[in-house]
Structures are given as C-alpha cells and as structure tokens.
Amino acid sequence: MTLQALLNRSPLRRLSVVLQHVRSMSSAASQDDVILEKVKNTAVITMNRPKALNTLNLSMVRKIYPKLKEWESDGSTSLVIIKATGDKAFCAGGDIKAITDAARAGEPHGHNFFKEEYILNHAIGTLRIPYVALINGITMGGGVGLSVHGHFRVATQRTLFAMPETAVGLFPDVGGSYFLSRLGGNLGIYLALTGVRLKGRDVQRAGVATHFVETEQLGDLEKSLINLENANENKVLDVLDSYHNKCTLDADKEFSLKPHLEKIDRLFGGNTLEEIFENLEKDGSEWALKQLEILKRMSPTSMKVTLRQLREGAKMSFNDCFTMEFRICSGCLAGHDFYEGVRAVLVDKDNSPKWNPATINEVTSEIVDAHFKPLDSANELIIN
C-alpha cells in the first residue's frame, strides 16, 4: 500500500503512518540534515532528511536560526528561500518521539526543542527581508512553523497541509494561535480541532499558502527569484504572481470546504467545546456527524486547550502568542495525553489512545487553566 493510500485513512491512522515513517528513518543528526547556502544575493535553506520526511530536529533549528539572523543583517542578502529535498514532504513536523523520550527521562531536550523552535518561528515571522517557502509535499506541525509566518508560501499539487496535534495529545503550536485564528470565519478552529487535511490548491484557497504553482515549475520559479536584481517584496510578489497566474492545474476546481463553510462558521462558533459538540449533534447532517466522530477520537484536554488557545490568540500580538504557546507546551510535557498519544500512534501503534481525562465533560476549567499559567521567570520564553 502506498503512503498516499494510507494517508487517506482516519486522522489517527494518517498521523500514525507519518510518525511511523519518521521513526523508522530517524537517526543521529548528520552534518547535512539542512543545507544552508548563498546563491547570488539569495539565501537558500534546504531541509535534507527526505527519508525522514524532512522532520525538524534540534540540530536543524540550531543551524537555521543563526544563519537567518546573519543573512537578515549582512546587507548583501535580499531574499531567503526555504525548500526541501524530495517530493514527499516539505517538513512533516518535529521529531516528537525524541522529545517524549527525553522528557520521560527528565532531560531538557523537549523543552529546549520547543523553545528554540518557537524562537526560530518568530524570527521567520519578523524577518526584514522577503522569505519564500516552497511547501511541496507534506507540511505539518513544525513544517507549518517554518513556512506559514513568512512573507510568501507557495503550494503545489503535492502539498498536504494539516495541524493534527489534537490526535496526539498536543495542540497546534508553532504560532498556530496567531495564524489559525486569523483565517476566515471559524476555519482555523475547525482545522485545529479536527486535524483535517488540505491538499493542493485548497491550501492556497484556505489562506495558508499565498500562491499555487505546479511542482514541475518550482525549479524555474526558484531560478527566476534568484535572478532578481535587488530583490524586494514587490519584485518577489510580481514573480510569484506571474507563475501563479500562468498555472491552470485545478484552477476550475471549487475549494473542497466551500460547501461546508457556513456550517463550519456556525457549528464551530461555540464558546465551549461542549457547545460545539452539541451544535454538531443537533445539526444531524452526515457531514456534521462525521466531524463529531472525528472529534471524539481526539484528546479531550488538547481540544479544550486548543479552543481557548485560538480564542485568546485572535486578540494577541505575534510575540505574545509564542509566550502563551510555550506555557501550553510546558503543560503538555508535564501532563499525560502527549505521551499517551505518541505511545498509541508511534510506539505500540494500536491507534487506541487512552486519554485522561477520557471525556470533554471531565476536563475541568482548572485543568485547562493550568496550561496557561505563567512559568517561573527562568523558564518563560523570552523573545528579543
């Protein structure tokens, strides 16, 4: 069975496939897990772990961040392009198995990974020179953080976007509280709670990507960008628009979620998770009941935390969203469901997590509040 066929299964099964693939190919970070080079006045970041779906590890974060800051300030770099080796994945996420193993052993790796990853995500979102992400292939979790905050994101027919964290006892981090909460209507809440996938042009139509180009044109697009003289945001936009406008693949296809947008806005507009569940049940349509069944498989704690995260993130600054997310992350690392989710989809592979608390009614406001409490000053995320 192909990877694509497996990805067509249920959310937990899809996540299990991706994580099993990553685990089977994970190894010690090599010197070339990410390639950083300068071509003319363009800096090019190439994630180079194709057999591991280009999953992000701490080694890669620690290589990318200082170079990004160097390029931003050196006066000779006018553009940054980030891409990946291979056609299967731009970046399928972070190496969460290594994170949970370290956290269980009392090692700081997990906290360090998230802290330094968020600082990198913030640097991308505040970069003073144009940043173009070529998100060809699977783009989930950590891969979203490496792309979505940049000036431009180019999807292809191979792009598969999802934020499936509630299926593994986590939450849509890497700045998800900022960008998901700013998608149209309640689309971001829907994507965050269900972990639903968006493919190809849908990624651009949802507002996650800014442009759509066929995979086969990415090489020419990259050359056109590199050949720009004195590149600036407007010049880069002109090139991207040109390629986007010439692309006819699936141009006449309707946004796959368009028939459901009214229901998404109405049914996922509840102030509480209980209200959303009730809305879906009362609606009773085939689509609504299918979403309800998806939600019932997710971590109740993760879903309640996620709903509050996005509600608050909609009113927060970019900086404050990351501060909040690191507090939530610390709560997840101190809790139960993240480890249980990884066990179920990655270790034992039974895809039957035993969440604790087991139902949304058992997740008290005190449990949710604990994920948002300020940390000790020495442990807070500080972004300069």
Image (cartoon, helix red, strand yellow):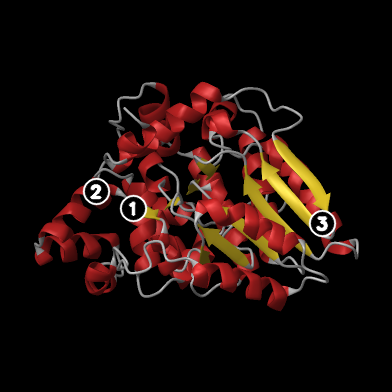
Work out whether 371 lies above or below 22.
Answer: below
Number of labels in the image equals 3
Work out whether 60 lies above or below 268.
Answer: above
Q: At which x and y percent is residue 14?
A: 34, 38
Tell me, yes or no, whether the two marked residues, 3 and 1, touch with CB atoms within 8 Å: no
Q: At which x and y percent is residue 365?
A: 36, 57
Disc 3: CA contacts within 10 A as few (<14), some (14-19) or many (>=20): some
Identified by mark 2, the residue type is: Ile
Closer-to-camera residue (140/213): 213
* Residue where numbered disc 1 is placed: 196
N-terminal of the two: label 2 or label 1? Answer: 1
Q: Which mark is residue 69?
A: 3
Front: mark 2 or 1 = 1
Q: At which x and y percent is residue 85?
A: 62, 39
Identified by mark 1, the residue type is: Val
Helix, strand or loop at disc 2? helix
Front: mark 2 or 3 = 3
Work out whether 99 lies above or below 274.
Answer: above
Tell me, yes or no, whether the two marked residues, 2 and 1, touch with CB atoms within 8 Å: yes
Q: State the CA–CA distance, disc 2 to disc 3.
A: 41 Å
Q: Residue at x 69, y 78 (%)?
A: 234
* Residue where numbered disc 2 is placed: 294
Helix, strand or loop at disc 3? helix
Image quadrant holding the N terminus, namely: top left
Q: Residue at x 44, y 38 (%)?
A: 338
Disc 2: CA contacts within 10 A as few (<14), some (14-19) or many (>=20): some
Q: State the CA–CA distance, disc 3 to disc 1.
A: 34 Å
Helix, strand or loop at disc 1? loop
